[in-house]
Amino acid sequence: MLATFLLASFCQHGAVATAEPYATQASNYILQEGGNAIDAAITASFALAVTYPTAGNIGGGGFLLYREPEGLSWFLDFREVAPQAGHPKMYLDEDGELVEGASTRGWRAVGVPGSVFGMWEAHKLWGSLPWKSLLQPAIELAASGFPITEAEHKRLSRLRKTLGKDPYARRSFYKKDGFPKEVGSLLLQPELAITLRRIAKQGEKAFREGPIVKAIVEASVAGGGALAEEDFANYKPEFRPVQKIRWRDLTVLAATAPSSSGLFLSQTLGMLSQFSLGAWGWDDPRTVQILGEVEARAFSVRNRWLGDPEGFDFGVAALSHPTFIKKLGAGLSPNRFTRPLATNFPAPWESSETTHYSVVDSKGGAVSVTTTLNSGYGAKVMAPGGFMMNNEMDDFATKPGFANQFGLVQGKYNQVVPGRRPLSSMSPIIVLRNGQVDSVIGSPGGPTILTTVLQVFLNRYVFNMTPEKAVAAPRFHRQDLPPTLKYEANRLDSKTISRLRALGQPLQKIRKLGNVDAVFRDRDGEWIPVTDPRW
């Protein structure tokens, strides 16, 4: 009960929902000390790097969506970028074939991390408390330790033969016999504490030059990676346009490219407007089937056309124009399964190891942040400073027309180019009603982030579920390739499953989809923070 409370907690100064109780507690403390939503989000970010190393990070990147109390909205992109030594063929062999694991494991899979730069930029513009004070909870957690949870122990056990091979990760997470440290034992991270103290003292400069950067680059070179000191010196977080989606009496604030969330939501909500989902009900076979169909069509546009906006040679706004969306949704039927064009793709390996946190403060500020290492524990390599490094390079189209680890078959606009950011499914959103923040929603889950956020939104605003039910309700996912509709085991009605099979829809049971952290406003105007019971 205590852990559930700490994961999603309300106080008179605002509300916070994160994936980990210590991070939530630290973030709430900042609100109670007079910090604003940005301050609390920064504290959550660094605390998660300590207590949730599978996804929380300073060696990764992410997206931050901020709605100021005065009404201005901002999208800050601190996504990882391809190093200057990167190139479109860096993961292909002499025959032009993908080298297995090259873009997912080891230092060659690592992109230039942006998390520290993103948090520093947010604080510089909007923070109210001193930078050092925002990192202090994370420093204390790293130095003093915290009990290893059963969930963390299971994750470390599964990765013992990969993550356990890295000397720094082995020293941090495993015993001398090669097995994870016991459940309940203290996880002490003194090297990470030193790194955090340096960041607290120097700010982003600690990640631009000096011992942290030199140690990362030396480890990268030794491990066959592509990182150079210049990559860190030249990294720049970017401000992107906020996509505003008008839907009924609501406005959805979403991220634009290199995030695919704004386009995905505008297309799916636009296509769904021709159907009476509310009258059907959330678990009606027609609802499930038509959602799968619109998801697949939106994914087909995403994968073909999106990437870093620096590489676009067309007007991407046309893809969310009502005329285009009408054409995209032509011929949709809840009584018909449509199969996409065949192409080359292997059986996908699914990872859900991204993390999201939602924060609102007492003045009406709202922050929606999704941050990631990509796979669980990223590239399975730890920097000498005690933090995990991302494997974000796999989010590029390492070979256009062939699938990445998530089964996504992507195109030329998402090829590896030095300094470019890979296309992302991360979907932090903020929902406004009558000009006021009504909810802050996000989730981890690779490409299933997009469908998870869409379905939680529909649950709340179409099917009129309570915040708790909107997050807890069964979910399903379909992308263009493979055309399989994934659904959570034992959670969809058997009649619905039978009807989908009769339509020819390929089905696959999986354990869970997404892991939402959200904050909702109730009818009385009070904030309700909700963390997914799937956690």
Image: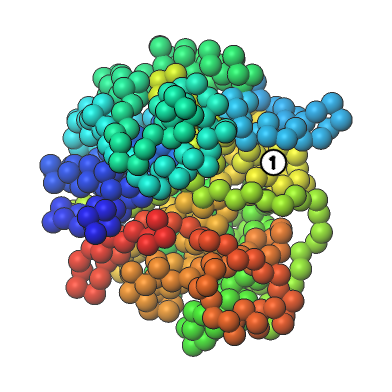
Tell me where residue 514 appears, x and y as whole percent.
48, 58
Q: Quadrant of residue 53?
A: top left
**Percent coordinates x, y for residue 86 in the rendering:** 66, 25
Q: Residue flagged by tag 1: what amino acid is it?
A: Ala
- Can residue 65 be seen here? The reply is no
Query: Residue at the front extreme?
Result: 177
Secondary structure under tag 1 reads: loop
Residue 188 sits in quarter: top left
Residue 14 visible from this viewpoint: yes
Of 373 and 384, the residue lying toward us: 384
Q: In this rendering, is residue 192 above or below 464? A: above
Where does the image place residue 16, in percent across and percent down from the top left? 26, 52
The answer to whether residue 467 is above or below residue 275 is above
Residue at the image point whose x is 55% and y is 57% from the top = 448
Spot the residue most to the bottom. Answer: 279
Q: According to the image, label 1 marks what residue? A: 397
Q: Quadrant of the C terminus?
A: bottom left
**Residue in the picture at 44% in, 24% down:** 176
Image coords of residue 400 (percent x, y): 75, 43
Which color scheme is applied? rainbow
Quadrant occupied by the N terminus: bottom left
| Left-right relation of 49 to 337 | left
Could you tell me which residue is drawn at 72 percent across and 47 percent down?
403
Q: Residue at x 53, y 61 (%)?
A: 511
